[in-house]
Image: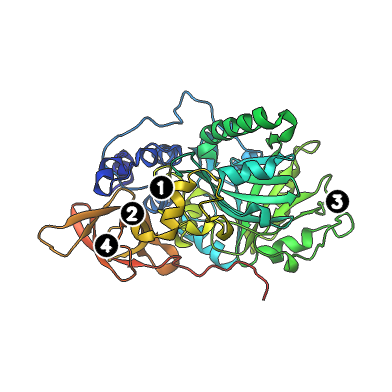
Amino acid sequence: MSSVRLFKKSVDLVAARAAAFNAPRASIGSTVLRRELSSALRAAPRTPATRITVRAVIPQVRNQAARYASSSSEPLAKTQLYDLHQAHGAKMVPFAGYSMPLQYADLSHVESHAWTREKASLFDVSHMVQHQLSGPGALELLMKVSPSSLDKLAPNTSTLSCLLEQGTGGIIDDTVITRRGEDSFYFVTNAGRRAEDLAFLGAEIDAYRSRHGMDSIKWDILEDRALVALQGPLAASALQPLINTSASTASTDLSTLYFGQCRELYITLADGSASPSPLLISRTGYTGEDGFEISIPTSGAADLPEQVVNLLLKDSNTVRLAGLAARDSLRLEAGMCLYGHDISTAQTPPDAALGWVVGRDRRDAATATFNGASVILPQVASPKTLKQRRVGLTVEKGSPAREGAIVVDLADPANPVEVGVVTSGLPSPSLGGINIAMAYVKNGFHKKGTELGVKVRNKVRKATVVGMPWIESKFHRPS
């Protein structure tokens, strides 16, 4: 299919198929994330590299279902690294209200994906929303809106969690929450959910303050910080030489910084001086590789993010820039959800195979106070009650199963019965192009080894339920 025809394929997500397993999915169908990436790729130059990227990232869909959130009349925001992206020949596209790099001139999507798995790639994720929550009520508030055992976190450690709707327990957003101190937390939420998250958190915080006073919680959106993700097996060796051992007060040995931990460290700039402020370096990421997310302050040093990135890019045989295309295929291989595709308010954590985010000490219905506990805890206790389950699929050779493709039971091949829907899918670059996909299927069809079918271009292709991730996670943990 030509890139033009593919670009003209329009948006039909799983809302129309919700009745198949009695779960509303409008929020997936209307998500800013998917719409904007779809819209962006239609506007991208039609070169062979772009054509590869589109096939790997864009869901193949059927009907125009919603207006795009980023139209030509809406000005796009720029991250602190916009000029650097331009200088490196990036294809900039609208994404979550920002002009973001899709890929760069030096590497195709597949090459960039492989570079991350073999060496190290640097992603600009400054469009994401960085929050600071502090005060005597910060812990209680966060333990109401999320199900994690945040009170058990040691300082400077983090956990993946979810923000939950009151009553339903639906996932408003996924987030990584870091405890910085006794009453201080740092967390990052998705750019595509910015308006919804800020409205939700604002209402929850206002309600808490009305009961406990304005000084009970201080909430800051850290607009003055850039955020980059350095991912890949050579990430630590690329970052370690930049750490300034004289100015930093915390341990500067990155080998003792493990997955889920963070430190504030200074770096050594090109002129030999220490950075004017420390960087918050967290050992985490969304590719399945070892790596770091680095929050860079810009107050008093607007060019610090660009200085840091240029230092990391100094050895082009080790670190290269990577964009949205590689980020999407990397996270899918790692079995990680993308909000608006694989999770939404239509799913609770157990629906989405994320029941583990519910802290074990928070599963007593008599004491659980987090949003949606009355819905979520019975699901955790008895998964058989779930109507749908998120699963991994491998699909037979041929056209890949894209988002919105229907999953069917092949017990009667002449009359296949619809049992689910694909939420993300592409040919896996790390697995030689094997077609992989995430999907929601009816409970009972979720067991590993279950043979199913997926409707792709009016043809049913055989698929098998498999465990996720498809590639082994390489997080740096204590030996």
Task: Tell me the CA gap for discs 3 and 2.
Answer: 52 Å
Nearer to us of marks 1 and 3 is: 1
- Whether the residues at callouts 3 and 2 have beta carbons within 8 Å, the answer is no
Q: Amino acid at mark 1?
A: Gln
The location of residue 215, given as percent across then percent down, is 75, 31
Q: CA distance from mark 2 to mark 1?
A: 9 Å
**Helix, strand or loop status at disc 4:** loop
Mark 4 to mark 1 CA distance (whole Å): 30 Å
Q: Residue furthest front?
A: 366
Q: Residues within 10 Å of mark 4 (few under 14, many from 20)?
A: few
- Tell me the kind of residue under disc 2: Gln
Marking on residue 274? 3
Q: Quadrant of residue 470?
A: bottom left
Residue 349 in sight in this render: no
Please determine whether, in this image, residue 66 is positioned above or below residue 321. above
Q: Looking at this view, name the residue that lies furthest to the top.
A: 73
Question: What is the number of the mark on residue 388?
Answer: 2
The x and y percentages for residue 81 are: 65, 41
Q: Nearer the viewer, residue 58 or 252?
A: 252
The structure residue drawn at horizontal position 80% and vertical position 49%, both measured from the top left corner, is 278
Judge whether 238 appears above or below 82 on screen: below
Tell me which residue sits at (67%, 57%) in the image: 152
Element on which disc 1 rests:
loop
